[in-house]
Image (tube, rainbow, N blue to C red):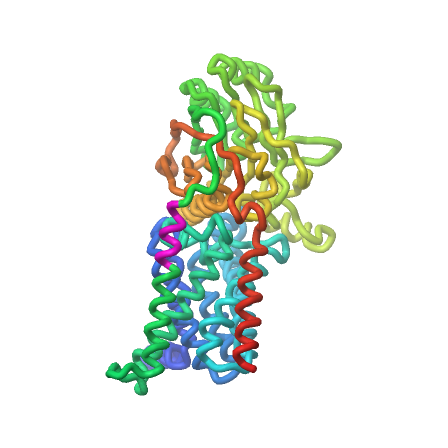
């Protein structure tokens, strides 16, 4: 009897959520995840956002619109960034329930931004047609930018990333990832408006053509124009080759995260990387983030000599990830060995709680008690750092999720001719994180018109062309060396010149246009 009552209660509760739209919003948010790598079904986020816009349009008050946005965000982030649980529990040794709670709370925090978008668009006292096509897309992209900026930023799952290989990728060199999101959101608004009109009772397809039918044809035409124009823009070469093509070797050591900082396993780790590097004849060899899990001055001199000699025999250079200590501060860094003099890059954009603890006097003791994260209190590298001059190129290195911040990457342009990302995504096991991260790097290549070389511990190690396409990659969670050719590029894409300003200008024009139409 009690069991039947519980089942009936759960069924009725779920049905009430679907009836009020919250369940549909949640499911639409979950479906968005399949638009990103490794699935790559890019139409899904367009359709999912159209569902959310339709639900927002039917909301009778701003509060309900906010809750619908929250439900959508909870679905998107609980499904899309659940790999945080793996990092906290499997490798950070946080108790299971606490790790699960932390992951869900983080997803709920991120969902608040979409709730804000829902509330904001509902406050506009304008016709629904103008809201769904103009205000909703503008509000959506505005909160995506806010999420990627506030509290050091977390731009993961910005919907524009789902379109690195869709026709809309053509807008990336002009408007950046937020511009791609804006075009996608406008497409969702148009799709929702078109669907509403076609299913409405007052539309009749007849001759002579009525005013509403003219609007419908115009909306379809605009939607098709956006996507066809994006496909045409994909054919434009915004930058030009610099120097000669050169051979590269990207090393994937596949060192298990639970062994990476184990003192007993350090010798084996060093032997692995020496063996893999020695097997290559490439001009440029790149090792992953903290491939050598020690301070630079603690690396055995014999290993340094062997790596140096090998690189010089190849007439090239090696980029090596390690830690550094300088004046009592510790840095996540990359240094060079080989034909060029030794140079260094220090990571600037650190991971909150992973590489530094905010409000340390208040939170430090608690975080250290529940998390086991080696080198979890690092210092930031200087904002302005000299590019690494290797193999005749000027290389802009970014470490880990520094590549998630497009405007920070473009600061190195136009001087940089090549982008290199070194990463250790072993923290996230066999989750979606590594594939999503590789897709983020694809967007940076598109925005900058530069090749991106990615050397990772467990994957995805890849060579990404200046057009954002993955040219070659290694299978994940396998030791290997990715061999290929790379080409430097010079020149500036429009996005490299003006950053996110163009996307913001479009958003401002949309809002002003809506206000003008209202009056």
Q: Residue at horizontal 42%, vertical 59%?
A: 79
Main secondary-structure element of the magenta-colored stretch: helix
Magenta range is 227-235
Look at the image and tell me whether residue 356 can be seen.
yes
Q: Is residue 195 above or below residue 314?
A: below
From the viewer's side, name the closer residue of 366 and 448.
448
As for residue 231 lying within the magenta part, the answer is: yes
From the viewer's perspective, tell me whether residue 41 is left or right of residue 69. Answer: left
Image quarter of residue 465: top left
| Residue extending farthest bottom | 202
Q: Quadrant of residue 133?
A: bottom left
Q: Residue 425 placed where, x, y %?
A: 47, 42
**Residue 51: horizontal and vertical position, in percent?**
39, 71
Q: How many marks?
A: 0
> Depth check: 134 or 50 in front?
134
Residue at x-position 40% and y-position 73%: 23
Residue 35 vertical position relative to residue 271 in the rendered view, above or below: below
Q: Residue furthest front?
A: 208
**x, y percentage for residue 127?**
48, 82
Residue 57 in the magenta stretch? The answer is no
Q: Quadrant of the N terminus?
A: bottom left
Describe residue 490's horizontal placement relative to residue 35 as left or right.
Answer: right
Q: Is residue 325 above or below residue 410?
A: above
Picture coordinates of residue 55, whole percent (x, y): 42, 76
Q: Is residue 327 above or below residue 180?
A: above
| Location of the C terminus (image quadrant) | bottom right
- At 35% from the left and 82% from the top, the residue drawn is 211
Looking at the image, can residue 454 be seen? no
Identified at 48% across, 76% down, the residue is 131
Residue closer to the observer: 400 or 229: 229
């Amino acid at each position: 009897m009690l069991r039947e009552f519980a089942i009936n209660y759960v069924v009725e509760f779920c049905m009430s959520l679907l009836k009020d739209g919250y369940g549909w919003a949640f499911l639409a948010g979950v479906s968005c995840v399949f638009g990103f790598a490794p699935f790559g079904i890019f139409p899904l986020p367009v359709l999912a956002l159209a569902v959310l816009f339709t639900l927002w349009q039917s909301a009778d008050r701003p509060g309900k619109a906010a809750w619908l946005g929250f439900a959508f965000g909870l679905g998107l982030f609980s499904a899309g960034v659940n790999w945080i649980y793996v990092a906290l529990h499997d490798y950070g040794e946080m108790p299971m329930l606490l790790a699960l709670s932390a992951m869900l709370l983080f997803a709920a925090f991120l969902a608040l931004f979409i709730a804000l978008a829902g509330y904001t668009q509902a406050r506009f006292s304008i016709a629904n047609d103008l809201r769904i096509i103009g205000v909703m897309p503008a509000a959506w992209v505005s909160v995506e930018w806010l999420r990627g900026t506030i509290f050091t930023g977390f731009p993961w799952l910005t919907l524009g990333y789902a379109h690195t290989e869709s026709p809309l990728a053509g807008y990336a060199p002009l408007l950046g990832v937020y511009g791609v999101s804006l075009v996608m959101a406008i497409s969702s608004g148009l799709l929702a408006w078109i669907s509403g009109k076609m299913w409405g009772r007052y539309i009749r397809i007849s001759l002579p053509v009525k005013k509403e039918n003219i609007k419908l044809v115009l909306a379809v035409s605009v939607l098709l124009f956006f996507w066809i124009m994006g496909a045409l823009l994909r054919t434009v070469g915004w930058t030009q080759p610099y120097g000669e093509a050169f051979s590269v070797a990207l090393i994937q050591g596949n060192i298990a995260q639970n062994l990476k900082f184990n003192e007993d396993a350090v010798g084996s780790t060093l032997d692995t990387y020496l063996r893999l590097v020695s097997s290559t004849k490439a001009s440029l060899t790149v090792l992953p983030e903290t491939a050598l899990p020690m301070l630079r001055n603690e690396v055995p001199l014999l290993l340094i000599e062997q790596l140096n000699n090998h690189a010089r025999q190849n007439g090239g250079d090696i980029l090596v990830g390690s830690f550094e200590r300088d004046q009592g501060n510790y840095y996540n860094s990359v240094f060079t060995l080989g034909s060029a003099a030794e140079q260094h890059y220090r990571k600037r954009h650190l991971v909150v709680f992973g590489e530094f603890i905010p409000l340390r006097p208040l939170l430090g003791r608690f975080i250290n008690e529940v998390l086991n994260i080696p080198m979890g209190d690092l210092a930031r590298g200087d904002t302005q750092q000299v590019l690494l001059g290797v193999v005749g190129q000027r290389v802009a290195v970014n470490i880990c999720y520094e590549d998630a911040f497009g405007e920070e990457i473009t600061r190195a342009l136009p001087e940089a001719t090549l982008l290199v990302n070194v990463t250790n995504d072993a923290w996230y096991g066999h989750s979606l994180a590594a594939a999503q991260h590789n897709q983020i790097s694809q967007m940076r290549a598109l925005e900058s018109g530069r090749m991106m070389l990615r050397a990772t511990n467990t994957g995805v190690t890849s060579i990404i062309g200046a057009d954002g396409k993955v040219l070659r990659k290694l299978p994940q969670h396998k030791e290997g060396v990715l061999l290929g050719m790379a080409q430097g590029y010079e020149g500036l894409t429009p996005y490299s010149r003006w950053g996110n300003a163009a996307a913001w200008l479009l958003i401002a024009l949309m809002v002003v246009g809506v206000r003008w139409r209202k009056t």
